[in-house]
Amino acid sequence: MAAEHTSGDELARFLRARRNQTSPESAGLTPGPGVRRTPGLRREELATVAGISIDYYTRIERGKETRPSPAVIDALACALHLDDDEHHHLRELAARAAHHAPEPPSPPSRTVRPHLKLLLETMRPSPAYILSRSMDLLAWNPGGLALYAGIADWPAKQRNLARYLFLHPTARQLFPDWDTQVRGCVARLRAEAGINPDAPDLTSLVGELLLKSPDFARLWERYEVIGRKKTEKTFHHPQVGELTLSGQGMNLEGTPGQRLSAYTAEPGSPDHDAMLLLDMTAPAAATTPDTKAGPSRRTQS
């Protein structure tokens, strides 16, 4: 069982990871002679660039100071050259660290409302699906499931896009830029886990991937975080060949923790033809995992 993390621990962990990946040169410093034991900035160097005392910064990084001011947080973000998403994440971690024993939020619902299932169906032939915050597939249309070649072979309750990227044998062939895809995947999970460090759905998935995938473990240690942006993805699909689709994700109103993702292509283009073929040839299947009790559910376990 994973040990519980406090918000102060998560703030410290993020700062330490970013410090280790910031070179003295990028911070405007000239490294002294001799071998450096630290791969990035030393604590005292970061404190100096940020304009705060070394003792104070050390307490923050050790999780003993949990109420750094917004000015200190902004100074650290500037010294570490954080981008907007990383800066926002640092502010969120600091805000949570400042609250002692916060009330744990209710677990997000995994129930997909009927009108959302209908929405997925009306979006055909565009592949579309609904994900949980831990990237579990909660609902999909035929193309949305078929897009990730081979994931339908897994029991419905195992279908998770992070698990697919790292553990399914087809994933590396499906994505020509697999390295970029998995880096973004881990960064999004890091951002979620940073603000919900003890959420069972996140800790269970992360624990599994840390155990089973050295690639995941290596990226997880880097503690990179990014926001979700409109993306264009190329798929080398074994059924329909190569297709490049524009992707868009959006949070769903009234269902915290659920997110809809959809892919489109320009009508009349080869990519659109491939997308249409994918939708037409995808096996007809339920749009959600089977959640009813009974023998059929037990056989999937």
Image (cartoon, rainbow, N blue to C red):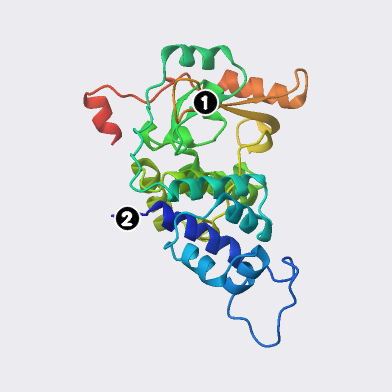
User: What's under tag 1, amino acid-wise?
Assistant: Tyr
Of residues 222 and 275, the one nearer the viewer is 222
Q: Secondary structure at mark 1?
A: strand
Say above or below: 141 vs 64: above
The answer to whether residue 128 is seen in the rendering is yes
Instruction: Tell me which numbered mark, 2 or 1, is placed earlier along the sequence.
Output: 2
The quadrant in which the N terminus is found is: bottom left
70 horizontally vs 210: left or right: right
Q: Position of residue 119 (x, y in %)?
A: 53, 14
Q: Say which quarter of the image contains residue 50.
A: bottom right
Q: Is residue 197 above or below residue 234?
A: below
Question: From the viewer's perspective, is 115 left or right of 44?
Answer: left
Instruction: Note whether residue 169 is visible.
Output: no
State whether residue 232 is above or below residue 34. Answer: above
Mark 2 nearby-residue class (10 Å; few <14, some 14–19, many ≥20): few
- The quadrant of the rendering that contains the C terminus is top left
Question: Image point 71% across, 79% down: which residue?
Answer: 31
The kind of secondary structure element at disc 2 is loop
The residue closer to the viewer here, 136 or 92, is: 92
Q: Position of residue 149 (x, y in %)?
A: 54, 35
Mark 1 residue crowding within 10 angstroms, few (<14) / some (14–19) / many (20+): many
Q: What is the tally of numbered marks visible in this picture?
A: 2
Return the residue at label 2.
Answer: 2
Q: Amino acid at mark 2?
A: Ala
Extreme residue toward the left, this view: 294
Residue at 78% x, 23% y is 269
Q: Which residue is mark 1?
A: 129
The residue lying at 75 percent from left, 68 percent from top is 28
Front position in the image: 190 or 59: 59
